[in-house]
Image (cartoon, coloured by chain):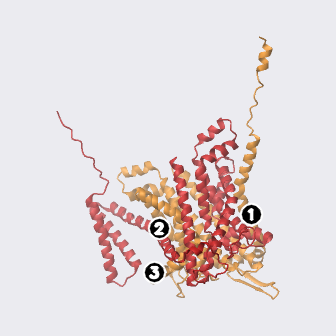
Chain colours: A red, B orange
């Protein structure tokens, strides 16, 4: 009788302790070298540390690989470092933005911010007076008006592109893409020239919402289209096979099945326009009082408030701007998290 | 049992038709109208901006694009006596800033897209993708104010370094030594804004690289870089270029972020480190506040030029991205 000894499984692709030790040593060595060079030569500053560390690390790993495994491995190690630096440079600004906005904005946040408007306060007044109420209500008004107009158009466009595949599908797909590239200031100018000057002659939330609608439609249309494409064709065929017309199939089977995805599309659309500034500067007038009438009179909004405070320039005003930015950023973070949660639930089902 | 009775029970044959029912006709009409909305809106934008800007465009002719005067004089009654409108400086500034942005953003985005697809562990990839997508949705005013108050001092320091050590290169020359609020600073801020866009387009394209070829490359003993060079880059090259064009279009139309960091001067300037620049979109914000009705028309004409410019860039980007989707495999 022979005993068969099963070979114990190995994972040759994983880093061995020796490899890890080597990586750690190279990493530490390049930090040390960068530190030494900065303290010995005239170069100084964060940039010098960062750049020198990166150059040393790249050179050390590539050199080590060249010595131990040859030219191809050295090139691979070189690209490894480049790719890592790419990721770091992409993430660094966002970390800096979030950190700065929170650190500077938190000073301007107090309870009165959400219960007062700026009717009796100037941006340069002490921080305890005045607040964001007019800006928050204004932004909510603008977003709701824009939603009322852009949800039907955006979803109809998506339905056209996925359900009715006529000869116009390709050109319309192209136009939706082109529309998503329309600069926000051009959307503002368009409403200014087409409606505000010839017809209404007055700033109002509605004018701003029209411009925001133009910016929001492509976002909603493209995201909804992606969602509708994911709905299996079996559902549509089943609907038609049961004798349903196309109208009933789409309205009662396809759209309900895509519901959470469509909500995600709408939330992404809100995130797209919530902080849009340029068209509001042209169209809404940026009033300092809570304005309950969306069709007449100038109305404030978060971006406009931030812009006004930033341009006022005094330290108090700048802190106000940071506080406004913090509120806006938190709003967008919440919207984005919601969209993510809904989006993943759709996939899980 | 009579045959007549049996015949009576047979219903008349159903009329088969391919005609949609009435409800479907209405449905199709409504949906098609909705689908055409993008055409209608884009058309209306072009029509209204050209209609409003027509007077100025006719008066200035081709000089609107080639001169860089922007002046208007009115008499006491408010009538325009003399006016010169030209956006050459702003056009040059728009192109210069956005090209700087793309030149900086493209390598960074390609590398980070490669990192996300082929280097990052799954958990890190998930987090980074969420963060980068969110960054793409951040409002431009956030980038503008952050860029002005936080980023600008360091970028000006980098600009001085570039000028000191690489000043012999023609595009890093700096004649009057003014580095504050230069197109370079605006370009860096725009680059940070478009990195998420180019990264997510490139990531999308790279993830469509054929898996069998990737595995074949590894099976032949390729290193990760050799695999990327042989499989991923040939597959994704034109898609990445399309993504860069999308970023270019976004950078050209950017208003607030550029306005906060750029020193807007009506003077054609190709020196990227010199603190003189412009941008068509920020011109509109700058002049809108105190503009007379006639000057507003000139701003409309400038808006039309910007609209057409971004439309062309976006159309090219779309064509390029779409053609890769098909020919890639």
Q: Nearer the viewer, residue B325 or A213?
A: A213
Q: Which residue is mark 3?
A: B166
What is the C-alpha distance between the residues marked 1 and 3? 48 Å
Closer to viewer: mark 1 or mark 3 = 1
- Secondary structure under badge 3? helix
What is the C-alpha distance between the residues marked 2 and 1? 38 Å
Residue B99 visible at all: no
Q: Percent x, y for residue B74?
A: 78, 86
- Residue at the (38%, 82%) spot, across then down: A44
Label 3–label 2 contact, CB within 8 A = no
Q: Are marks 1 and 3 on the same chain?
A: yes
Chain ID at mark 1: B
Q: Percent x, y for residue A14?
A: 31, 55
Q: Nearer the viewer, residue B33 or A141?
A: A141
Q: Percent x, y for residue A83?
A: 42, 64
Q: Quadrant of residue A178?
A: bottom right
Which residue sits furthest right?
B77
Q: Nearer the viewer, residue A206 or A81?
A: A206
Instruction: Identify the disc placed on residue A90.
Output: 2
Disc 2 crowd rating (10 Å Cα; few below 14, some 14-19, many 20+) is many
Q: Quadrant of residue A89?
A: bottom left
Q: Nearer the viewer, residue A131 or A29?
A: A131
Chain ID at mark 3: B
Compared to B42, does A239 lie above or below? above
Q: Are marks 2 and 1 on the same chain?
A: no
What is the C-alpha distance between the residues marked 3 and 2? 25 Å
Closer to viewer: mark 3 or mark 2 = 2
Q: Which residue is mark 1?
A: B44
């Amino acid at each position: 009788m022979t005993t068969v000894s099963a070979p114990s499984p190995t994972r040759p692709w994983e880093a061995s302790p020796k490899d890890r030790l080597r990586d750690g040593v190279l990493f530490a060595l390049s930090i040390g070298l960068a530190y030494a060079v900065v303290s010995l030569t005239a170069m100084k500053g964060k940039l010098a540390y960062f750049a020198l560390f990166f150059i040393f690390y790249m050179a050390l790993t590539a050199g080590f690989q060249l010595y131990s495994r040859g030219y191809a491995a050295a090139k691979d190690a070189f690209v490894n470092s480049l790719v890592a630096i790419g990721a770091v440079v992409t993430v660094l600004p966002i970390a800096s933005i979030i950190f700065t906005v929170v650190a500077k904005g938190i000073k301007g946040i107090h309870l009165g911010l959400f219960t007062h408007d700026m009717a009796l306060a100037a941006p340069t007044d002490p921080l305890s007076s005045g607040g964001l109420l007019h800006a928050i209500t204004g932004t909510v008004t603008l977003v709701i008006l824009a939603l009322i107009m852009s949800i039907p158009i955006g979803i109809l466009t998506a339905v056209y592109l996925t359900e009715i595949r006529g000869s116009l599908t390709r050109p319309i797909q192209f136009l939706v893409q082109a529309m998503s590239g329309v600069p926000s200031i051009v959307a503002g100018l368009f409403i200014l020239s087409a409606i505000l000057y010839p017809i209404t002659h007055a700033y109002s939330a509605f004018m701003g919402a029209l411009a925001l609608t133009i910016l929001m439609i492509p976002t909603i249309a493209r995201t909804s289209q992606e969602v509708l494409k994911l709905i299996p064709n079996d559902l549509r065929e089943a609907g038609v096979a049961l004798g349903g017309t196309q109208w009933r199939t789409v309205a009662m089977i396809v759209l309900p099945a895509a519901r959470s995805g469509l909500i995600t599309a709408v939330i992404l659309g809100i995130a797209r326009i919530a902080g849009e500034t340029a068209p509001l500067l042209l169209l809404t007038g940026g009033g300092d009082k809570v304005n309950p009438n969306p069709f007449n009179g100038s109305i404030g909004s978060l971006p406009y408030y931030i812009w006004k405070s930033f341009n006022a320039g005094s330290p108090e005003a700048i802190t106000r701007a940071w506080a406004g930015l913090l509120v806006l950023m938190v709003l967008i973070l919440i919207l984005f998290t919601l969209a993510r949660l809904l989006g993943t639930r759709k996939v899980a089902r | 049992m009579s045959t007549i009775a049996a015949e009576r029970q047979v219903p008349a044959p159903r009329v088969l038709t391919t005609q949609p029912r009435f409800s479907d006709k209405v449905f199709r009409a409504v949906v098609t109208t909705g689908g055409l909305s993008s055409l209608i809106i884009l058309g209306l934008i072009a029509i209204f901006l050209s209609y409003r800007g027509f007077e100025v465009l006719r008066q200035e002719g081709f000089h609107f694009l080639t001169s860089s005067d922007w002046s208007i004089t009115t008499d006491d009654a408010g009538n325009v006596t003399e006016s010169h409108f030209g956006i050459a400086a702003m056009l040059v500034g728009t192109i210069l800033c956005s090209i700087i942005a793309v030149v900086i953003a493209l390598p960074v985005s390609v590398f980070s897209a490669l990192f996300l697809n082929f280097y990052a562990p799954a958990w890190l990839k998930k987090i980074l993708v969420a963060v980068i997508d969110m960054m793409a949705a951040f409002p431009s005013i956030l980038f503008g104010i952050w860029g002005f108050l936080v980023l600008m001092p360091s970028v000006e320091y980098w600009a001085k370094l570039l000028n000191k050590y690489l000043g012999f290169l023609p595009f890093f020359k700096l004649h009057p030594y003014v580095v504050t609020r230069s197109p370079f600073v605006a370009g860096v801020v725009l680059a940070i804004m478009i990195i998420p866009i180019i990264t997510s387009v490139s990531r999308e394209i790279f993830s469509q690289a054929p898996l069998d070829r990737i595995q074949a490359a590894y099976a032949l003993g390729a290193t990760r870089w050799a695999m990327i060079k042989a499989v991923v880059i040939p597959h994704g090259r034109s898609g990445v270029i399309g993504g860069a064009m999308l970023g270019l279009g976004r950078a050209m139309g950017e208003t607030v972020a550029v306005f906060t960091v750029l020193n807007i001067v009506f003077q054609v300037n190709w020196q990227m480190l010199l603190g003189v620049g412009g941008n068509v979109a920020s011109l509109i914000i700058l002049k809108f506040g105190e503009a007379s009705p006639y000057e507003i028309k000139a701003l409309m004409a400038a808006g039309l030029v910007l609209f057409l410019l971004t439309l062309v860039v976006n159309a090219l980007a779309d064509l390029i991205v779409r053609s890769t989707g098909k020919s890639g495999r």
